[in-house]
């Protein structure tokens, strides 16, 4: 592709992402839905202005790495430990049930290959902590009893999801399920999770020292992006997906990070906050490109919409995705209103589900119809819960306040 054509493509993508994101937010939907729809509109599904060429896919890869960096940056491990058994039950059952349901439906009912069924189940495990936090904050429930359980569960759900993503990545590049290689990957990824944040934290102290003595603006974004890209490369070296490196770097630089086994480093809340503030514009520039490219990768014209298979597959997976996340909340001791609100808070898939789906498509695991069905489920499970939670809160807030 010639440079001027690429510039035009990028211009259209950025403007379309912003326009449709603004429209989605005004319609009380998550901005990620607008960015995904932007890709569908300008891509082969509708107008056909832009194809998902390699240069755009590379920029989308940077976007998803920075997105996972932001997820790691907002992860609160201490919250997870304090939240106790209720969050753990909600997270583990909310992770395992959709995985089992999705796999069973795809493998036994729709007779999908083993690897495809595993990817489908894996995609349904995701919970978008960003969307969940946004809705809870809107309802002023983020610091409530239910909010603390949900946020603790969402943190653990993120960690389990990233570990599963590493396994699925190994299966995809290996061409099939190999449990010996999977065990090796888990060992490497576990070591990476333990050592990488420590190394990143030490490097951040060096960055802070240089920042204090530097007279040139822009040192923090430059060095932090370099750090994220380094850990993305390091993750690939140990056999994990590159985006895992972004997650580990974000986790280490979080203001809520602490080292295991009681070892701690000097904490600087102000510097950590400066990192978050100065990285926001870069993250906000690259991550919409990822979601638009996901939309570009979907060609709705190639799908047989008259096929009962597509609609039946999407509908059954949608039910499994919702029920699977609700199950965990009904195994904790709360009144029925709190259980239902906690369960609904875990349903949104959002950007995390799209990461799983895109890995499946990019690896050639999903064909176009399967990928489209998965994206339909992700979109519906992202749009429906915020409206359902707000309606539920208006009618049953008194029951939520009674639960302690």
Image: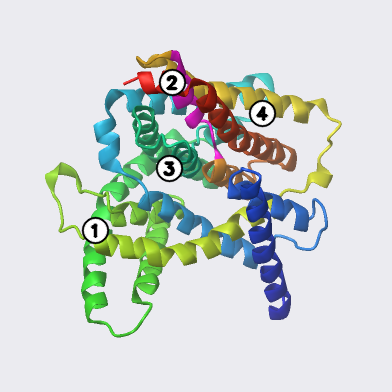
Residue 306 occupies quadrant: top right
Q: Residue 339: x, y in percent?
A: 44, 19
Disc 4 crowd, CA 10 A, few/some/many (<14, 14-19, 20+): some
Residue 101 appears in the figure: no
Q: Residue at x 64, y 30 (%)?
A: 113
Secondary structure mainly formed by the magenta segment: helix
Tell me which label, 1 or 3, sits earlier in the chain: 3
Circle 2 SS class: helix
Q: Residue 332: x, y in percent?
A: 36, 17
* Residue 197 in the image: above or below residue 111: below
Frontmost of labels 3 and 4 is 3
Tell me which label, 2 or 4, sits earlier in the chain: 4
- Contact between marks 3 and 2 (CB within 8 A): the answer is no
Residue 374 occupies quadrant: top right
Q: Residue at x 48, y 54 (%)?
A: 67
Frontmost of labels 1 and 2 is 2
Q: Residue at x 59, y 58 (%)?
A: 288
Frontmost of labels 1 and 3 is 1
Label 4 sits on residue:
112
- Front residue of 133 and 69: 133
Residue range highlighted in magenta: 336-349
Label 3 sits on residue:
162
- Measure the alpha-carbon separation of dots 4 and 1: 49 Å
339 part of magenta stretch:
yes
- Front residue of 323 and 333: 333
Q: Residue 280: x, y in percent?
A: 44, 62
Circle 3 SS class: helix
Q: Residue at x 74, y 51 (%)?
A: 40
Circle 4 SS class: loop
Marker disc for residue 269: 1
Residue furthest left in the image: 262
């Amino acid at each position: 592709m010639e440079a001027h054509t690429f510039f035009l493509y990028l211009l259209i993508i950025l403007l379309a992402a912003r326009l449709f994101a603004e429209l989605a937010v005004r319609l009380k939907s998550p901005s990620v839905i607008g960015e995904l729809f932007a890709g569908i509109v300008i891509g082969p599904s509708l107008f056909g202005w832009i194809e998902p060429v390699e240069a755009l896919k590379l920029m989308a890869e940077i976007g998803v790495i920075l997105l996972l960096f932001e997820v790691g940056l907002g992860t609160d491990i201490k919250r997870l430990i304090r939240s106790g058994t209720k969050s753990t039950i909600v997270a583990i059952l909310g992770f395992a049930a959709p995985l089992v349901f999705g796999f069973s439906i795809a493998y036994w009912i729709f007779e999908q290959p083993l690897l495809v069924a595993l990817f489908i189940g894996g995609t349904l495990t995701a919970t978008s902590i960003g969307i969940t936090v946004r809705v809870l904050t809107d309802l002023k429930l983020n610091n409530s009893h239910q909010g603390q359980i949900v946020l603790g569960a969402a943190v653990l759900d993120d960690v389990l999801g990233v570990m599963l993503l590493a396994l699925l990545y190994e299966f995809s590049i290996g061409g099939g399920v190999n449990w010996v290689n999977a065990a090796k990957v888990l060992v490497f990824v576990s070591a990476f999770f333990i050592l990488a944040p420590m190394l990143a934290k030490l490097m951040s102290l060096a960055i802070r020292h240089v920042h204090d003595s530097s007279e040139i603006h822009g040192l923090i974004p430059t060095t932090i992006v370099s750090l994220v890209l380094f850990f993305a490369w390091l993750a690939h070296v140990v056999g994990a997906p590159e985006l895992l490196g972004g997650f580990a770097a974000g986790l280490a630089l979080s203001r809520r990070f602490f080292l295991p086994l009681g070892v701690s480093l000097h904490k600087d809340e102000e510097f950590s906050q400066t990192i978050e503030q100065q990285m926001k514009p870069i993250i906000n520039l690259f991550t919409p490109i990822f979601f638009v490219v996901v939309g570009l990768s979907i060609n709705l014209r190639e799908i047989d919409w008259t096929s009962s298979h597509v609609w039946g597959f999407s509908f059954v997976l949608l039910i499994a995705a919702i029920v699977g996340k609700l199950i965990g909340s009904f195994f904790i001791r709360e009144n029925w209103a709190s259980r239902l609100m906690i369960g609904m808070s875990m349903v949104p898939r959002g950007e995390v589900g799209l990461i799983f789906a895109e890995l499946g498509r990019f690896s050639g695991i999903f064909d176009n119809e399967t990928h489209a069905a998965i994206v339909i489920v992700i979109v519906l499970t992202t749009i429906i819960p915020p409206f359902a939670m707000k309606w539920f809160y208006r009618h049953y807030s008194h029951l939520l306040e009674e639960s302690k």
